[in-house]
């Protein structure tokens, strides 16, 4: 999760431009919907307004200068104004985005962050997303918009994120495990391959990711499992492809990372 996703697959990406780019927003909040086919890349861009990107179906990867954010169903990403970003949809995705006037959303901060969408926030988000581009501004729409902003401000963040790094000692490890997460080389074996001690490598993983090699590897596997789960891949096949010894070992690792079982996680995306 360090190399750009465009370089992590040999498949060809279908390049698309952003659906709407305004010189100025016609309303404080403007919505846009997207139905993206597999292997769609929305090219890197920025805009003077903030954006909330929400996945109704499928897993999006949104890449910024700080790293890659994984957005499965029932999750959203807050992108402050002027943030350079690009979207990747390895499989089909149904997306709802809200473009928000920065003057209306100062309390949401200036940092990109992932948000967990609870049922109330989901209802608010989808209601506002259904408004036409030039909806009539009334006291009711203003109140609903303010409630939406309030709920976004208190929405819990999650850790579905991998930062971008450039350390040449870690890049071969990250590149290999992105392509083959079942790789079983130990940190000592990697140390011999990249010409650094295992102690140095663990120190670097802690420096850049806030965790040692083993925990980073487990997180990488769980992030990759989200895509497989949302395409209906069986748990036994996911466990095998990610290099787990058993399905139960995968379920245990999933619970440690996301706080629930894969089955419960999938049920959250069912209306």
Image (cartoon, helix red, strand yellow):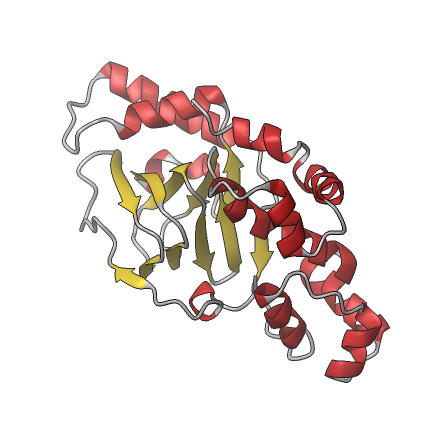
| Residue 122 drawn above or below residue 21 | above
Q: Name the foreground residue: 260 vs 91.
A: 91
Rendered residue at 70%/37% (across/down): 255
Q: Name the foreground residue: 188 vs 249.
A: 249
Quadrant location of residue 236?
top right
- The residue most toward the top is 140
Residue 112 visible in image: no
Image quadrant in which the N terminus is located: bottom right
Rendered residue at 54%/32% (across/down): 266
Rendered residue at 76%/62% (across/down): 213
Q: Position of residue 204 (x, y in %)?
A: 74, 69
Image quadrant in which the C terminus is located: top left
Q: Position of residue 49 (x, y in %)?
A: 31, 46
- The residue most toward the bottom is 195
| Residue 168 drawn above or below residue 26 | below
Residue 227 visible in image: yes
Q: Position of residue 19 (x, y in %)?
A: 22, 49
Rendered residue at 19%/49% (across/down): 22
Q: Name the foreground residue: 8 vs 104.
A: 8
Q: Position of residue 167 (x, y in %)?
A: 64, 75
């Amino acid at each position: 999760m360090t190399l750009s996703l465009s370089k992590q697959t040999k498949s060809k990406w279908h390049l698309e431009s952003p659906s709407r780019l305004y010189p100025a927003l016609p309303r404080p909040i403007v919505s846009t919907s997207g139905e993206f086919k597999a292997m769609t890349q929305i090219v890197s861009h920025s805009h003077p307004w903030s954006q909330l990107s929400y996945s109704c179906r499928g897993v999006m990867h949104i890449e910024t200068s700080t790293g890659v954010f994984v957005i499965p169903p029932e999750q959203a990403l807050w992108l402050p104004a002027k943030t350079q970003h690009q979207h990747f949809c390895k499989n089909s995705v149904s997306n709802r985005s809200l473009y928000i006037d920065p003057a209306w959303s100062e309390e949401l901060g200036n940092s990109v962050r992932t948000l967990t969408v609870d049922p109330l926030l989901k209802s608010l988000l989808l209601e506002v997303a259904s408004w036409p581009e030039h909806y009539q501004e009334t006291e009711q729409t203003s109140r609903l918009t303010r409630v939406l902003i309030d709920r976004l401000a208190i929405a819990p963040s999650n850790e579905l994120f991998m930062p971008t790094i450039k350390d040449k000692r870690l890049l071969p490890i990250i590149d290999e495990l992105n392509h083959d997460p079942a790789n079983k080389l130990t940190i000592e074996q990697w140390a011999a391959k990249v010409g650094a001690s295992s102690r140095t490598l663990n120190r670097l993983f802690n420096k850049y990711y806030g965790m040692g090699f083993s925990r980073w590897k487990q997180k990488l596997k769980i992030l990759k499992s989200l895509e497989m789960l949302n395409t209906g891949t069986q748990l036994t096949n996911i466990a095998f492809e990610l290099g787990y010894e058993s399905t139960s070992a995968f379920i245990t690792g999933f619970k440690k990372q996301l706080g629930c079982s894969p089955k419960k996680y999938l049920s959250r995306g069912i209306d």
